[in-house]
């Protein structure tokens, strides 16, 4: 796939408008219209039901209300989120097309030899949520703790289901099993929901997914949660320890959902989008709904989100290289 043309890193530009002048009496028209002037397209890089889609649909009505314009959710899944990113990278940089994507956006630039986009093609707008991943097993597995699971995996062949190749659920499990514990364990990629279903059905003994699809099944006893990958315990499962607590200090990994615009989108528009997305994330009814789904709303400024994004691009590039992973 041919790489997209270069754009300045998070560059901005100024829109100039000509004032129209009429015969007496002369009437000066506004120099520029207020954003937005038409419906906003919120392109989701994953299918309906994915975390990116859920967060986009929770934020969408709040944005539409604030903007006085329709906000249209458009799912364009495929290639691990690359297709949606490619579409938005080529969109007009005026704020009317936004990307809702996951941390896969930061991973794929290293995982794929030709992802079809570069980080420089985008302007960070807002972080949506930061959600830890979770490690769990089928109830028949004779391990009630991470320590016991690692010991079991040293004695007999084991496999685990993740949310897909190159996702943080995959990379975190590979670091834990292969890098830190030198285990030869088989990875079975799925979608998030399918990974949980595979463990519940006993097709795969171990699961590594983001929190939302696993929490209801963990609380009902259909799977046994062993550890979460956050720096501190998750309020959704307060009795489940962190990987760091269990002998791996400093271990922390998250799945995030965030919003980006094409590079060159005016800074004033980025600030307006950021303010309204953060306002939506902190609305009581949105926070309540997210808590019930084990999402953690994480409002940030564009600069704060950019810092997280660039750090993750660098960190996951090292993990991908160290593990010798490639998606194509």
Image: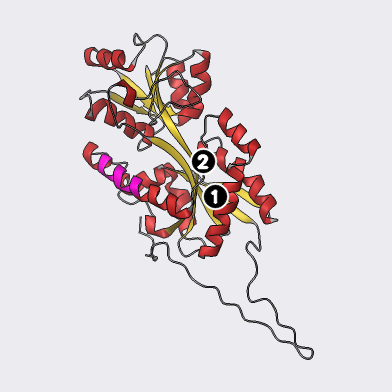
- 283 and 159: which one is in front? 283
Report the magenta residues as a range: 311-319
88 or 266, which lies in front? 266
Give the structural element (helix, strand or loop) at label 1.
strand
Q: Please provide percent x and percent y for residue 139.
A: 42, 10
Q: Quadrant of residue 273?
A: bottom right
Query: Which residue bears the numbered disc 2?
Result: 52
Q: Position of residue 25 (x, y in %)?
A: 79, 89
In the rendered image, the vertical position of residue 326 relative to residue 3, given as above or below? above
Residue 94 shows in the view: no
The residue tagged 1 is 43
Residue furthest to the left? 182
In the rendered structure, which disc, 1 or 2, sits on the residue that comes first in sequence? 1
x 65%, y 69%: residue = 33
Magenta-span inclusion, residue 315: yes
Direction right: furthest residue: 25
- The quadrant of the rendering that contains the N terminus is bottom left
Q: Main secondary structure of the magenta part?
A: helix
Looking at the image, which is closer to me, 139 or 164? Answer: 139
Mark linked to residue 21: none
Q: In the rendered image of this protein, does residue 282 appear above or below residue 8? A: above
């Amino acid at each position: 796939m041919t790489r997209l043309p270069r754009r300045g890193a998070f560059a901005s530009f100024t829109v100039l408008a000509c004032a129209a002048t009429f015969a007496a009496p002369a009437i000066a028209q506004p120099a520029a219209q207020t954003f937005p002037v038409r419906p906003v397209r919120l392109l989701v890089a994953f299918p309906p039901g994915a975390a990116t889609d859920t967060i986009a649909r929770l934020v969408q009505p709040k944005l539409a209300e604030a903007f006085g314009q329709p906000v249209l959710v458009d799912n364009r899944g495929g290639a691990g989120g690359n297709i949606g990113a490619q579409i938005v990278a080529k969109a007009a940089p005026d704020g009317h097309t936004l990307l809702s994507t996951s941390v896969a956006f930061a991973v794929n630039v290293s995982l794929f030899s030709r992802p079809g986009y570069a980080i420089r093609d985008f302007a960070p707008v807002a972080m949506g949520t930061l959600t830890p991943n979770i490690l769990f097993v089928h109830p028949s597995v004779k391990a009630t703790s991470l320590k016991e699971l690692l010991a079991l995996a040293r004695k007999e062949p084991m496999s685990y289901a993740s949310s897909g190749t190159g996702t943080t659920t995959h990379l975190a499990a590979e670091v834990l099993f292969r890098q830190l514990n030198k285990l030869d364990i088989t990875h079975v990629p799925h979608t998030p929901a399918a990974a949980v279903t595979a463990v519940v059905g006993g097709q795969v003994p171990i699961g590594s997914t983001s929190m939302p699809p696993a929490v209801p099944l963990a609380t009902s006893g259909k799977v046994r949660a062993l550890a979460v990958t956050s720096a501190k315990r998750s309020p959704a499962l307060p009795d489940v320890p962190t990987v760091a607590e269990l002998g791996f200090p400093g271990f922390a990994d998250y799945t995030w959902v965030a919003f980006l615009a094409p590079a060159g989108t005016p800074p004033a528009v980025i600030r307006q989008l950021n303010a309204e997305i953060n306002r939506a994330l902190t609305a009581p009814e949105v926070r309540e709904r997210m808590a019930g789904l084990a999402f953690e709303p994480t409002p940030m400024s564009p600069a704060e989100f950019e810092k997280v994004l660039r750090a993750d691009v660098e960190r996951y590039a090292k993990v991908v290289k160290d593990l010798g992973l490639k998606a194509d």
